[in-house]
């Protein structure tokens, strides 16, 4: 029987739009979690270097400088920031799951909302690119592909992940369930403003703003219930530095600042295979005292939980949606896991060497 896994979900803010400083902060959190016996350390959606929430609040014509900074600070999948994370995983003997904004070598402006999974030996086990950017995210990121729709086998059980809105995609979720997923990681931004009102305006805005906590938990809980898997929701934290950078230079900077300060923050929490909340715990860095909490939301910290992934078996008796509760003769799903690239070069083989090679060129 697999041994229990201690999961550390880091509810943290990046050093906004600084890949190097955010990576250093991540390594610090990893060391802390490792000292507290964590086997898996998780960071939120595009923790390195930031989540581009400015696209929800500022006109695209105002965001050129922010996008340029985002492109400059996004990281290569084999770049120095990832190598630092690989070293941290190896030194602390822990699995890492980190959200990154990934840049590419074939374009100076193509970015992906990606998630990288690193093993305790420092090897990259998976790199998943978000299948489809959600809403205003399309102004920053390109659509990903199916290459990263993979579940990772570990000594503790099978672990998979999806990024934010992908947890609304039934086919993406089914792909992971069909790989015997037992722990599902879902990563989220710190804030998601969709409908806001200006307190200085007499005009009332109809409708409610997006309920970050409820919407995220509903999606994650639905997946846990269908997969009969444990779940961890890891959300980012929004700090004052981020708010200042996002609002700076905007004609309505005061309004943007107010929206960011008053919008509901995302929450970090754990769920069991029925979708029910599992209380986690924090650990005091000075005393080592454990404190039980249901979730982290308004302050930075690390939320821990000890999970026995073998406990996923019981629910499969009721609804095994990829097994005894499925009709494979009726429904068929094909997933293309080929990594998509903009061009494939087929160079001719080198010509044989000649004594007089003046004509070879």
Image (spheres, rainbow, N blue to C red):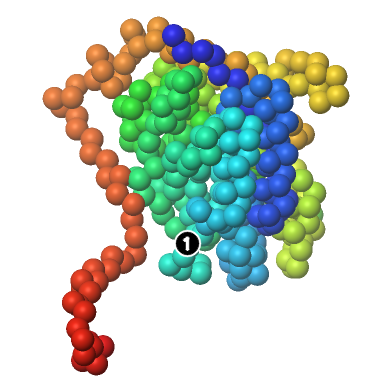
Position of residue 38 relative to residue 97, above or below, is: above
Q: Is residue 139 visible?
A: yes
Percent position of residue 180, x then y = 35, 23
Secondary element type, mark 1: loop
Q: Residue furthest front?
A: 355
Q: Residue furthest right?
A: 286
Whether residue 358 sits left or right of residue 124 in the image: it is: left
Position of residue 317 relative to residue 322, above or below, is: above
Percent position of residue 22, x then y = 69, 49
What residue appears at the point 46 percent right and 20 percent down from the top-left corner?
Answer: 155
Position of residue 270 relative to residue 301, above or below, is: above
Quarter that holds the C terminus: bottom left
Q: Quadrant of residue 128?
A: top left
What residue appears at the point 50 percent right and 43 percent down from the top-left corner?
Answer: 116
Who is closer to the viewer here, 280 or 92?
Answer: 92
Q: How many marks?
A: 1
Mark 1 residue crowding within 10 angstroms, few (<14) / some (14–19) / many (20+): some
What residue appears at the point 47 percent right and 61 percent down from the top-left corner?
Answer: 104
Q: Residue furthest bottom?
A: 358
Position of residue 162 relative to residue 258, above or below, is: above
What residue appears at the point 60 percent right and 20 percent down from the top-left corner?
Answer: 6
Q: Is residue 295 visible?
A: no
Quarter that holds the N terminus: top left
Whether residue 285 sits left or right of residue 84 in the image: it is: right
Percent position of residue 215, x then y = 55, 32
Q: Which residue is mark 1?
A: 104
Who is closer to the viewer here, 196 or 97?
Answer: 97
Who is closer to the viewer here, 361 or 312?
Answer: 361
Percent position of residue 107, x then y = 46, 68
């Amino acid at each position: 029987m697999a041994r229990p896994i201690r999961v550390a979900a880091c509810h943290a803010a990046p050093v906004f739009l600084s890949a190097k400083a955010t990576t250093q902060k991540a390594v610090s959190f990893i060391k802390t979690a490792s000292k507290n016996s964590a086997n898996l350390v998780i960071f939120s959606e595009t923790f390195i270097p930031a989540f581009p929430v400015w696209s929800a609040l500022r006109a695209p014509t105002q965001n050129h400088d922010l996008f340029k900074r985002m492109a400059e600070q996004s990281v290569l999948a084999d770049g120095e920031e990832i190598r630092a994370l690989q070293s941290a995983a190896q030194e602390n003997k822990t699995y890492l799951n980190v959200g990154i904004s990934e840049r590419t070598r074939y374009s100076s402006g193509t970015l992906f909302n990606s998630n990288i999974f690193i093993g305790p030996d420092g090897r990259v086990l998976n790199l998943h690119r978000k299948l489809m950017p959600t809403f205003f995210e399309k102004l920053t990121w390109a659509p990903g592909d199916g290459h990263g729709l993979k579940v990772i086998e570990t000594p503790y059980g099978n672990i998979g992940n999806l990024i934010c809105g992908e947890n609304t995609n039934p086919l993406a979720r089914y792909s992971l369930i069909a790989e015997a997923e037992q722990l599902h990681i879902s990563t989220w931004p710190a804030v998601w403003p969709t409908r806001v009102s200006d307190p200085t305006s007499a005009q009332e805005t109809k409708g409610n703003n997006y309920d970050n906590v409820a919407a995220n938990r509903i999606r994650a809980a639905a997946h846990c219930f269908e997969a009969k898997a444990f779940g961890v929701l890891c959300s980012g934290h929004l700090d004052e530095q981020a708010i200042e950078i996002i609002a700076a230079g905007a004609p309505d900077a005061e309004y943007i600042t107010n929206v960011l300060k008053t919008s509901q923050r995302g929450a970090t929490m754990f769920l069991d295979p029925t979708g029910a909340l599992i209380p986690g715990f924090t650990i005091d860095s000075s005393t080592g005292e454990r404190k039980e909490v249901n979730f982290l939301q308004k302050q930075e910290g690390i939320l821990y939980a000890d999970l026995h992934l073998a406990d996923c078996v019981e629910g499969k008796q009721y609804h095994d949606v990829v097994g005894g509760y499925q009709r494979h003769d009726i429904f068929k799903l094909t997933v293309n896991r080929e990594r998509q690239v903009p061009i494939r070069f087929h160079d001719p083989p080198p010509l044989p060497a000649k004594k007089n090679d003046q004509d070879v060129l």
